Image (cartoon, rainbow, N blue to C red):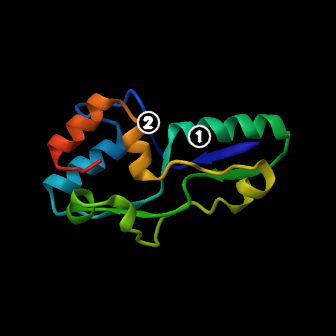
Amino acid sequence: SILRISNVYGKRMTVEGEGNLVINLLREGISKKQTVDGDYVYIKDVVEALVQSLGKGKKGTYNVGFGISYRLDRESIQKNVNEYYSGKKYFKIKKAKLDLGYEPRFDLNSGLRDMDHNLGLKLIWLGYMV
Protein backbone atom coordinates (compact mmCIF):
# COMPACT_ATOMS: atom_id res chain seq x y z
CA SER A 1 0.00 0.00 0.00
CA ILE A 2 0.99 3.59 -0.59
CA LEU A 3 -0.16 6.07 2.05
CA ARG A 4 -0.47 9.76 1.18
CA ILE A 5 -0.24 11.48 4.55
CA SER A 6 -1.61 14.96 5.20
CA ASN A 7 -0.03 17.57 7.54
CA VAL A 8 1.19 15.54 10.52
CA TYR A 9 1.56 16.91 14.04
CA GLY A 10 2.20 15.20 17.36
CA LYS A 11 4.18 14.78 20.53
CA ARG A 12 7.77 15.96 20.78
CA MET A 13 7.19 18.82 18.36
CA THR A 14 8.51 22.11 19.64
CA VAL A 15 7.03 25.57 19.39
CA GLU A 16 10.44 27.15 18.85
CA GLY A 17 11.64 24.97 15.99
CA GLU A 18 11.19 25.52 12.28
CA GLY A 19 9.79 22.88 9.97
CA ASN A 20 6.75 22.11 12.10
CA LEU A 21 3.88 23.06 9.82
CA VAL A 22 1.04 23.02 12.36
CA ILE A 23 2.96 24.97 15.01
CA ASN A 24 4.23 27.45 12.41
CA LEU A 25 0.69 27.96 11.12
CA LEU A 26 -0.63 28.50 14.63
CA ARG A 27 2.14 31.02 15.29
CA GLU A 28 1.56 32.82 11.97
CA GLY A 29 -2.19 32.82 12.39
CA ILE A 30 -1.83 34.55 15.74
CA SER A 31 0.87 37.05 14.81
CA LYS A 32 -0.21 37.90 11.26
CA LYS A 33 -3.51 38.34 9.56
CA GLN A 34 -2.99 35.22 7.50
CA THR A 35 -5.48 32.47 6.72
CA VAL A 36 -4.40 28.92 5.90
CA ASP A 37 -6.71 26.01 5.07
CA GLY A 38 -5.65 22.40 5.43
CA ASP A 39 -6.23 18.88 6.69
CA TYR A 40 -4.17 18.10 9.80
CA VAL A 41 -3.67 14.57 11.11
CA TYR A 42 -2.36 13.54 14.52
CA ILE A 43 0.62 11.17 14.62
CA LYS A 44 -1.32 8.49 16.54
CA ASP A 45 -3.84 8.33 13.68
CA VAL A 46 -0.99 8.04 11.16
CA VAL A 47 0.58 5.14 13.07
CA GLU A 48 -2.81 3.40 13.23
CA ALA A 49 -3.21 3.78 9.45
CA LEU A 50 0.28 2.35 8.87
CA VAL A 51 -0.44 -0.68 11.07
CA GLN A 52 -3.81 -1.25 9.38
CA SER A 53 -2.28 -1.03 5.91
CA LEU A 54 0.36 -3.61 6.80
CA GLY A 55 -2.20 -5.98 8.27
CA LYS A 56 -4.65 -5.83 5.36
CA GLY A 57 -2.17 -6.55 2.57
CA LYS A 58 -4.19 -4.41 0.14
CA LYS A 59 -2.58 -2.77 -2.86
CA GLY A 60 -3.50 0.78 -3.68
CA THR A 61 -2.97 4.39 -2.75
CA TYR A 62 -4.75 5.68 0.34
CA ASN A 63 -5.14 9.18 1.76
CA VAL A 64 -4.48 9.52 5.48
CA GLY A 65 -5.76 12.69 7.09
CA PHE A 66 -8.62 13.73 9.33
CA GLY A 67 -10.86 14.34 6.31
CA ILE A 68 -11.81 17.89 7.30
CA SER A 69 -10.29 21.17 6.24
CA TYR A 70 -9.51 23.52 9.11
CA ARG A 71 -9.14 27.25 8.62
CA LEU A 72 -6.30 28.56 10.75
CA ASP A 73 -6.40 32.30 11.24
CA ARG A 74 -6.31 34.74 14.14
CA GLU A 75 -10.02 34.38 14.93
CA SER A 76 -10.21 30.57 14.79
CA ILE A 77 -6.98 30.06 16.72
CA GLN A 78 -8.04 32.30 19.58
CA LYS A 79 -11.35 30.47 19.89
CA ASN A 80 -12.07 26.84 19.05
CA VAL A 81 -10.31 25.60 15.92
CA ASN A 82 -12.84 22.77 15.49
CA GLU A 83 -15.63 25.26 14.76
CA TYR A 84 -13.85 26.63 11.69
CA TYR A 85 -14.16 24.32 8.72
CA SER A 86 -13.28 25.85 5.39
CA GLY A 87 -14.40 23.05 3.08
CA LYS A 88 -11.17 23.41 1.08
CA LYS A 89 -7.93 21.43 0.97
CA TYR A 90 -8.82 18.22 2.75
CA PHE A 91 -7.96 14.61 2.05
CA LYS A 92 -10.74 12.31 0.91
CA ILE A 93 -10.26 9.34 3.22
CA LYS A 94 -13.28 7.19 2.29
CA LYS A 95 -11.17 4.58 0.46
CA ALA A 96 -8.84 4.19 3.48
CA LYS A 97 -11.87 3.84 5.75
CA LEU A 98 -13.47 1.16 3.56
CA ASP A 99 -10.39 -0.87 2.56
CA LEU A 100 -8.16 -0.48 5.62
CA GLY A 101 -10.64 0.22 8.40
CA TYR A 102 -8.91 3.56 9.03
CA GLU A 103 -10.86 5.85 11.34
CA PRO A 104 -9.09 8.98 12.62
CA ARG A 105 -9.77 9.60 16.31
CA PHE A 106 -8.11 12.98 16.95
CA ASP A 107 -9.55 16.23 15.63
CA LEU A 108 -7.19 19.21 15.79
CA ASN A 109 -8.19 20.31 19.30
CA SER A 110 -8.04 16.84 20.86
CA GLY A 111 -4.70 16.14 19.17
CA LEU A 112 -3.19 19.36 20.49
CA ARG A 113 -4.51 18.54 23.97
CA ASP A 114 -2.92 15.06 23.79
CA MET A 115 0.48 16.54 22.98
CA ASP A 116 3.16 17.35 25.51
CA HIS A 117 1.84 19.46 28.41
CA ASN A 118 4.68 21.98 28.04
CA LEU A 119 3.74 22.51 24.41
CA GLY A 120 0.16 23.10 25.49
CA LEU A 121 1.31 25.78 27.94
CA LYS A 122 3.39 27.45 25.22
CA LEU A 123 0.44 27.42 22.82
CA ILE A 124 -1.71 29.07 25.49
CA TRP A 125 1.03 31.66 25.93
CA LEU A 126 0.92 32.27 22.18
CA GLY A 127 -2.82 32.86 22.46
CA TYR A 128 -4.20 29.50 21.34
CA MET A 129 -6.81 28.04 23.67
CA VAL A 130 -6.28 24.28 23.99
The answer to whether 47 appears left or right of 74 in the picture is right
Q: Image point 74% across, 59% down: which residue?
A: 95
Residue 6, given in percent of the width and then of the height, sits at 52, 50
Name which residue type carries label 1.
Answer: Val
Q: Image point 22% across, 35% down: which residue?
A: 121
Q: CA distance from mark 2 to mark 1?
A: 10 Å
Q: Are marks 2 and 1 in contact (CB under 8 Å)?
A: yes
Instruction: Look at mark 1 in the image and give the residue it sits on.
Output: 46
Residue 5 marker? none
Location of residue 45 (image quadrant): top right
Name which residue type carries label 2.
Answer: Gly
Location of residue 34 (image quadrant): bottom left
Mark closer to the chain start, 2 or 1: 2
The answer to whether 14 appears left or right of 5 in the picture is left
Q: Image point 43% across, 47% down: which residue?
A: 110
Location of residue 126 (image quadrant): top left
Instruction: Look at mark 2 in the image and give the residue it sits on.
Output: 10
Q: Is 117 above or below relative to 83?
A: above
SS for tag 2?
Answer: loop
The answer to whether 26 appears left or right of 56 in the picture is left
Residue 28, given in percent of the width and then of the height, sits at 21, 51
Residue 57 seen in the figure: yes
Q: Residues within 10 Å of mark 2 (few under 14, many from 20)?
A: many
SS for tag 1?
Answer: helix
